[in-house]
Image (tube, grey):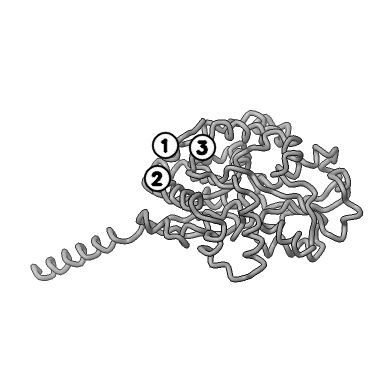
């Protein structure tokens, strides 16, 4: 009996040693892969940012930020990286989410149109009667891509009843296929996919949010797009996970800020020449794309709320939802 007790103690001790050395597992749901706005998440494991913090980040790719947020609520993931307007949409439906840190500094989305329609569609108004693709929403949250599309249509005097909006996902294969197959006439496309489609003469740009002339037509155009979020229970019961994930994200963003587009592309180990070329072109074109440190901007948060309220329906819950109660900036801190 004494020997059995000693053996059991030794096994417990060895097991505890291995457990102590095992990296913390962090599950992150994110649109993609290789979607420019969410690229820092793709880089985490490539540059060892998670290992440097004693953790292992596991990614679950989905077709839109709203779906990523649903994965967090359903406990299929600990964290989501998604558009903040999509988080507000979810909050308005009573499904709480906590905003932890910024990923983007500049929202980047491009309304692209099939190349064969260049002589027919020359303005937003010409989209009447057309089919437009957007990122995939969930049952309880409208994706930021759809919100932006609806605002642009409104700015061009196009009623939502006059177009057909369909979900198409948020990866290169999904977004390119619906244009090439002529499933949609136009697409609220993500970079670097939009630039690649244009370079291959598959599509042309109708409206680019990074263009000041387009941005001035959009209330709250400087909104915070991609950001890190979790559910309240993670903060309540496993705050060490949230603190670790914020540290990993900030480490990754600082790495991006100190490396060239060429070094970023090399770290991602992209083999396809066309994919690499379009990524490099986009990284050079959108120099303000990523937050340098994950800190949350008070001005950007105000812009985000303005953007969402202008996309919201007459639903009082959407019109009155506030972003500030959703923000937890203990680790990313606040600026301006």
Residue on which disc 1 sits = 330
Q: Residue at x 53, y 41 (%)?
A: 97
Marks 1 and 3, how far apart in space? Answer: 11 Å
Residue on which disc 2 sits = 243
Task: Look at the numbered discs 3 and 2 and tell me whether their residues touch, using CB distance below 8 Å.
Answer: no
In the picture, measured across the screen, residue 22 lies left or right of residue 311, that is left
Which of marks 2 and 3 precedes in the sequence?
A: 2
In terms of depth relative to the viewer, which is nearer, 84 or 270? 270
Task: Look at the numbered discs 1 and 2 and tell me whether their residues touch, using CB distance below 8 Å.
Answer: yes
In terms of depth relative to the viewer, which is nearer, 15 or 191? 191
Marks 1 and 2, how far apart in space? Answer: 9 Å
Assess disc 1: are there few (<14), some (14-19) or many (≥20) residues with their C-alpha within 10 Å of its C-alpha. Answer: few
Q: Measuring from the top left, give residue 208's x and y in whole percent.
A: 73, 47
Residue on which disc 3 sits = 296
Q: Measuring from the top left, give residue 44's x and y in whole percent.
A: 47, 57
Marks 3 and 2, how far apart in space? Answer: 15 Å
Which of marks 2 and 1 precedes in the sequence?
A: 2
In terms of depth relative to the viewer, which is nearer, 292 or 78? 292
């Amino acid at each position: 009996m004494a020997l059995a007790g000693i053996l059991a103690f030794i096994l417990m001790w060895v097991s505890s040693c291995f457990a102590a050395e095992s990296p913390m597992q962090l599950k992150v749901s994110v649109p993609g892969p290789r979607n420019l706005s969410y690229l820092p998440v793709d880089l985490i494991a490539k540059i060892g940012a998670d290992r440097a913090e004693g953790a292992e980040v596991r990614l679950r790719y989905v077709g839109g930020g709203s779906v990523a947020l649903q994965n967090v609520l359903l406990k299929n993931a600990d964290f989501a990286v998604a558009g903040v307007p999509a988080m507000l949409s979810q909050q308005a439906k009573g499904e709480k989410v906590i905003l932890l840190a910024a990923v983007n500094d500049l929202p980047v989305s491009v309304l692209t149109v099939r190349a064969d329609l260049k002589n027919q569609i020359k303005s937003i108004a010409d989209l009447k009667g057309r089919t437009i693709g957007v990122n995939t929403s969930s049952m309880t949250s409208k994706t930021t891509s759809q919100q932006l599309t609806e605002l642009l249509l409104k700015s061009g005097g196009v009623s939502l009843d006059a177009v057909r909006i369909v979900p198409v996902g948020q990866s290169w294969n999904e977004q390119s296929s619906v244009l090439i197959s002529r499933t949609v006439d136009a697409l609220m496309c993500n970079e670097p996919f939009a630039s690649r489609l244009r370079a291959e003469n598959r599509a042309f740009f109708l409206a680019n949010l990074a263009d000041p002339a387009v941005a001035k037509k959009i209330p709250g155009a400087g909104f915070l797009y991609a950001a890190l979020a979790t559910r309240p229970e993670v903060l309540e019961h496993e705050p060490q996970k949230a603190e670790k994930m914020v540290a990993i994200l900030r480490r990754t963003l600082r790495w991006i800020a100190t490396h060239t587009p060429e070094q970023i592309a090399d770290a991602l180990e992209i083999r396809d020449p066309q994919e690499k070329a379009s990524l490099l072109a986009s990284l050079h074109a959108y120099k303000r794309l990523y937050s340098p440190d994950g800190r949350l901007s008070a001005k950007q948060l105000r812009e985000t709320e303005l953007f969402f309220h202008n996309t919201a329906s007459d639903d009082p819950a959407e019109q009155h939802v506030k972003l500030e109660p959703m923000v937890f900036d203990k680790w990313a801190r606040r600026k301006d």
